[in-house]
Image: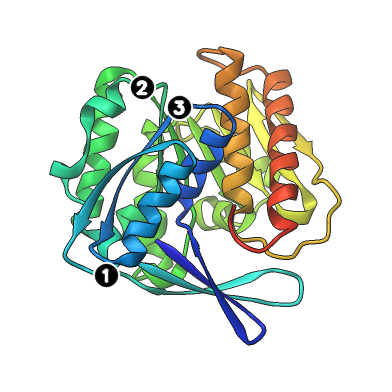
Amino acid sequence: MIDELRIGDKTVANVGGAPANFARGAARMGLRCAFIGAVGDDKRGRDCILALVADSVEPLCSVKHAATTVALVTLDGSGDRDFRFVRGADALLTEADVHASAITSSGVLHIGTLSLSAEPARSATLAALSAAEKAGVSVSCDVNYREALWPSPEAAREAALSVLPKVTYLKVSGEEAELLVGAAPPEKAAAMLAELGPSVVAVTLGADGAVVYSGGETMRVAAKPVKAVDTTGAGDAFWAAFLACLLRSGAEGEVSPELARRCAEAGAEAAAECVSRPGAL
């Protein structure tokens, strides 16, 4: 999708979408990445594909006879965002568009839950999860809740909870943690989410850093001090750096608390760099 960022009286267009941001960020950190998605048969769609290629991400993109999805982003004085969407091609991804061979040959399948908000993308996402499960491929999930794309918060909650038993690594914001398990301190929320399936849970808290649960322990990692210009993509940058650190370590199975902390600190560095400038990457 394209993020159209309003800054004062100017509008700046950037290639975005959380899973694509994640893939590009992870590729910049040396991981071999591919992106499965759908774009429109238009300039915005071509720009999305070119951005993936520029960051060495293999674009396994289906081109649809629809406009490329656009997110209209406005910022307040602290860099926090408000989203509106003109949804198009991304929701038209089908099961036939899912490259199962790319998934089964991967170390990790990363998904967002926005693709669960509409058919046929929901069925495509479930097919990707099924392919990963059959091949024993770990699954990473970023809930990335956007109220405007769901019929209700309850629908978003139910969709996210339905896939958590298949998820190995989970990232949520503090607000998303509350959506899923109710109001609770982030340390407790992370542990509660881990009980639903994931072995590693990260709760990102903006300027307050992140809480990570792994190996039966919960830890808090501080954010790096920086003046926030635009928080778009900060969570994607955090999670790309976190999983890049984790995969480079060669760890399999349960992730030790020491490794989880090291990876969260790498994530905090990447997030700080991201928010210091406009645009997701």
Q: Residues within 10 Å of mark 3 (few under 14, many from 20)?
A: some
Q: CA distance from mark 2 to mark 1?
A: 33 Å
Q: Residues within 10 Å of mark 1 (few under 14, many from 20)?
A: many
- Please, what is the three-letter code of the amino acid marked with disc 2? Val
Q: Is residue 178 left or right of residue 18?
A: right
- Please, what is the three-letter code of the amino acid marked with disc 1? Ala
Disc number placed over residue 118 in the picture, else none: none
Q: Is residue 85 above or below residue 249?
A: below
The residue wearing badge 3 is 32
- Please, what is the three-letter code of the amino acid marked with disc 3? Arg
Q: Is residue 44 left or right of residue 51?
A: left
Q: CA distance from mark 1 to mark 3?
A: 29 Å
State if disc 2 and disc 3 touch (CB < 8 Å).
Answer: no
Determine whether the residue tagged by mark 1 lies in a helix, strand or loop.
loop
Name which residue lies at 76% across and 47% down: 209
Snapshot quadrant of residue 183: bottom right
Snapshot quadrant of residue 11: bottom right
Q: Quadrant of the N terminus?
A: bottom left
State if disc 1 and disc 2 touch (CB < 8 Å).
Answer: no
- Between circles 3 and 2, the one closer to the viewer is 3
Q: Position of residue 83 (x, y in %)?
A: 51, 73
Q: Is residue 31 left or right of residue 272?
A: left
Q: Residues within 10 Å of mark 2 (few under 14, many from 20)?
A: some
Say which label, 2 or 1, has the lower sequence index: 1
The residue wearing badge 1 is 67
Say which label, 3 or 2, has the lower sequence index: 3
The residue wearing badge 2 is 137
